[in-house]
Amino acid sequence: MSSFILALAFFTLSTPTSPKVSPKPATTKKSAAHAKTKAKTKAKAKTEAKAKAKTPPTAPAKPGATIALKQKSPGKVISGTVRRKDPAPVKLVQTPTVPRTVTAKAPDKRKVRPAPAKPVTDPYPPMAVYHLNLREYASIRVYDENGFLLPQALRQFNHINRCVGSNVVLEMEWRLLVDLYQAWLEFGMPSVTIFSGCRQAPHAKQSRHNFGLAIDFKFDGVRNRELITWLLSHREKTPHAMGVGYYPNGYHVHMDVRDRHSFWVDLNQAGARGSMMVADAHHWFANEKRMRARVEATPPKEAVEQETADLTPTGQASTPDKDATLPDSTAQTP
């Protein structure tokens, strides 16, 4: 019994044991088709690689040889050559012998065009003033860009109208500057010549020049009669009264500020002392030509006195006395 057990044990040890095989996974139809496609692709790639390795590399054909072969056998296709299409014919642009007339394109009215730029003008330009006796020049800007009177303009106006003899600067009436500037703009901005502004005593004891209320001036290139006509019409529109003086035989006109309007005509010569006032200034000014002709036709006072002295006998007075007897005209009959 023991020998049987030993023999059985020796037989089990001597027989080899087979390895354990893991069960194959179950394959589906899709996976099988995919594996077949993949195997075919690999086989095709191997075949193409073997074919490339067997064929030697061919050198590219030269253009000249290709053209010669094409000319010999135009109908045959030779391996190793490339047949190219004939180039299309190039058409040159024909230039006309007569130049074309180019017409200007009509402007498009739909586009909004900017308005033409206007030149920038100064609304209140400075006034050029020259004092004849002081021989000084000043450029007075009366108003600023907003139309307000500038204090600097009044200081300049006071300085240019100072007294010639005493060199005293008075405060001139600002309305004189305003009226002078309006007249200057009205006549086209001419040069202004001032003859007299402030005149203190003893030069002017009872004149408005003594208080800075009057000026004597002239516009270069403007007749004094035209300036007087404008001043007489302008003073009717001002809130203050003005005095206007016309000097037909002088060089300037007079303008002042007062309580009531006044106008006079002085026939005295320029530079002479005194005055020769006209009785009715407005009538004389309206009929100046006729009145001037009458004055020129009237002999001067000195000539009348000289003529009377020549006709008077020597030793007798020019005016007969009351007791003197007049000569009898009847006694001198032929």
Image (cartoon, helix red, strand yellow):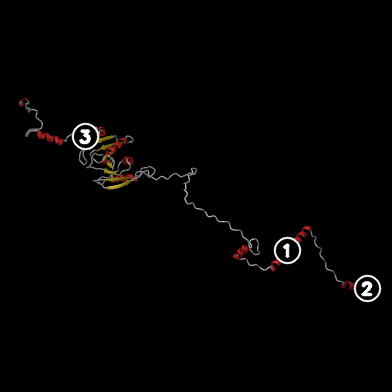
Label 3 to label 1, Cα distance in Å? 139 Å
- Asked if the residues shown at circle 2 and circle 1 are in contact, with their CB atoms under 8 angstroms apart, the answer is no
In depth, the one of 211 and 311 nearer the eye is 311
From this viewpoint, which residue is outermost toward the front? 72
Vertical comparison of 263 with 139: above or below: above
Q: Earlier in the sequence, mark 2 or mark 1?
A: 2
Find residue 44 and name its label: 1
Percent x, y for residue 170? 28, 44
Q: Give the labeled residue for mark 3.
A: 293
Q: Disc 2 marks which amino acid? A: Phe
Q: Which of marks 3 and 1 is nearer the N terminus?
A: 1
Identity of the residue drawn at 26% across and 37% down: 245
Identity of the residue drawn at 29% across and 47% down: 137
Secondary structure under the numbered disc 3 in the rendered image: helix
Vertical comparison of 304 with 145: above or below: above
- Classify residue 175 by image quadrant: top left
Front position among marks 3 and 1: 1
